[in-house]
Amino acid sequence: MDNTVYTTLNRQSGLMQEMQVVANNIANLSTTGFRKEGVIFAEHVAALDGGEPPLSMASAEGRVINRTQGTLQQTGGPLDLAIEGQGYFQIATPDGNQLTRAGDFTRSPDGELVTVDGFSVLDSGGSPIAVPADAGPVTIAKDGTISASGNAIGQVGLFEPADANDLVHAGGTRFKTAGDVEPVENGTLFQGFLENSNVNPVSEITRMIEVQRAYEMGQGFLDAEDGRIRSVVQTLGR
């Protein structure tokens, strides 16, 4: 395949991946605790024979998670929690423990603090948190301590990946890590609040338009190159 065509196809593939990421960000504008993503591009340079200029191409090599704080919205829900600053809630899933910033919690039939998907919320020691229905009014302090009728019954844990680059999107508002997680010291929680998505709609829509135009430009080049090659083949075949 011609180097020019190969380079353009590689670029088109990366742009398609970025378009998918941007579209997913826009779809989650109103998702509690959502963290927007971006695509990391890398340039690859290869030397060519015959004294030609080196071949340079870019490819999408991975995704990066934007850790910017989302705005906090008051809900008044006694089990709604929002994190201010660093930290993630740790939850137990069938695929292992994962992290999330979505704090719209509820009680399970067994009296455990769980996510809307039914995953157990873990305390600072990595154990499920029991919040019995008959325990009385629940209050949650800024350090995560859960009290009912004036008695402490547990503490919501806050965690961070040991290496921020290990954070990988696992689905929805959940993340997994390739390495270990560490407790967050002096984390701050707000009861009766939820953290909104950190997606900026204006910047995401602007980026979508830019990516779409870049993709259309590349497609136009491929169409023109295809026409040129066909013309050469037809001329040589006469």
Image (cartoon, grey):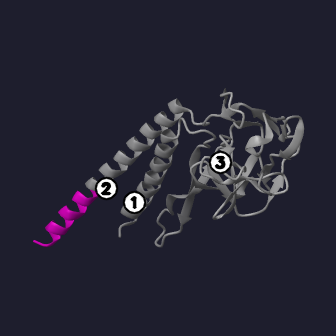
* Between marks 3 and 2 in the image, the one whose residue lies nearer the viewer: 3
Whether residue 138 appears in magenta in the rendering, the answer is no
Viewer-proximal residue among 66 and 227: 66
Spatial CA span between label 3 and label 2: 48 Å
- Tell me the quadrant of the picture where the N terminus can be found: bottom left
| Tag 3 secondary structure | loop
Q: Position of residue 82 (x, y in %)?
A: 72, 36
Type of amino acid at the residue the image marks with label 3 = Thr
What is the crowding at mark 3: few (fewer than 14 residues within 10 Å), some, or many (at least 20)?
A: some
The image quadrant of residue 83 is top right
Q: Report if the CB atoms under discs 1 and 2 are less than 8 Å apart.
A: yes
Q: Which residues are magenta?
A: 225-238
Residue at the limit of the structure toward the left, as seen here? 238
- Residue bearing mark 3: 115
48 or 63, nearer to the observer: 63
- Label number found at residue 92: none
Q: In x, y percent, where is residue 16?
A: 43, 52
Helix, strand or loop for the magenta stretch, by majority: helix
Q: How would you rate the neighbour count of disc 1 (Cα within 10 Å): few for under 14, some for 14-19, many for 20 or more?
A: some
Residue at the spot of label 1: 9
Q: Which residue is mark 2?
A: 222
> Residue at the location (59% across, 43% down)?
36
Residue 232 is inside the magenta segment: yes
96 is higher (above) or lower (below) than 187 = below
Q: Amino acid at mark 2?
A: Leu
Give how far across and how far down residue 80 sits, in percent.
69, 36
Q: Earlier in the sequence, mark 1 or mark 2?
A: 1
What element does badge 2 sit on?
helix
236 vs 213: above or below: below
Residue at (33%, 51%) from the top-left corner? Answer: 219
